[in-house]
Image (cartoon, grey):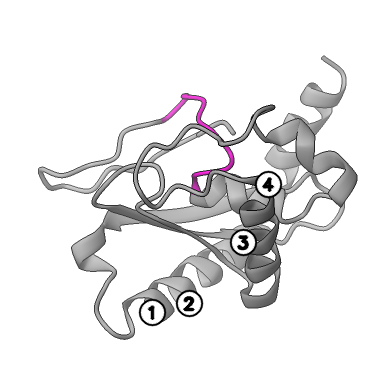
Amino acid sequence: MLHLHVEEPQRALRFAASGTLDFTYCTGLGKMLMSTLPAEQLAEHLPQAEPYLEFTPKTITTRAGMEAELAAIRERGYSLDDEERNRGVICLAVLVPVAGAKPVSLSISAPSGELMQPGDQERCYHAVRDTAETLAANPRFVSALAAFNSKVNNG
């Protein structure tokens, strides 16, 4: 999974990852993208051996656990990295609904204390989903995504 851009907040605690590669199985963005894959392609995006590397006590470390998590993501429409990659950080991700494009996900990450109160995740889900829908309706974004997909497909 590649972080293309991270918008950092104006505060001391930040997540800076633009242009970095990260694991799919323990990140909100990665799990959201994996939830779109056919079952036969899932192994290509998971570590070869179980248990997978455990970054925190909450990291999902088995294929069976990941398959259950992906089913839950498809059911609720968003993924959640609940301190699976980094202690104290939660990430909520959604798909950007662009027809005909490779899946793209958008997320919000925050200190766990900011997404643990009743209603926080629901509020953030709606904000991220609305932003994803706004992006998908923007002709400039769709054109840029098509150009990126073309470049990826053609080397």
Location of residue 55 by image quarter: top left
Q: Quadrant of the N terminus?
A: top right
Disc 2 or 4, which lies upstream in sequence?
A: 4
C-alpha separation, residue under disc 4 versus residue under disc 1: 30 Å
Q: Are circles 4 and 1 on residues that touch, CB within 8 Å?
A: no
The amino acid marked with disc number 3 is Glu
Which span is picked out in magenta? 18-27
Q: Tell me the crowding category of disc 2: few under 14, some 14 to 19, or many 20 or more residues within 10 angstroms, Cα based.
A: few
Q: Are circles 4 and 3 on residues that touch, CB within 8 Å?
A: no
Q: Secondary structure at mark 3?
A: helix
**Disc nearest the viewer among 2 and 4:** 4
Q: Which mark is residue 126?
A: 2
Disc 1 or 3, which lies upstream in sequence?
A: 3
Q: Secondary structure at mark 2?
A: helix
C-alpha separation, residue under disc 4 versus residue under disc 3: 10 Å
Q: Which residue is mark 3?
A: 69
**Disc nearest the viewer among 4 and 3:** 4
The amino acid marked with disc number 1 is Arg
The amino acid marked with disc number 2 is His
Q: Secondary structure at mark 4?
A: helix
**Disc nearest the viewer among 4 and 1:** 4
Disc 4 or 3, which lies upstream in sequence?
A: 4
Q: Is residue 85 above or below residue 67?
A: above
- Taking the spot 12% from the left edge, 47% from the top edge, the residue there is 11
Residue 105 is one of the magenta-drawn residues:
no
Q: Position of residue 132 (x, y in %)?
A: 58, 62
Residue 21 is one of the magenta-drawn residues:
yes
Q: Position of residue 117 (x, y in %)?
A: 24, 79
**Disc nearest the viewer among 3 and 2:** 3
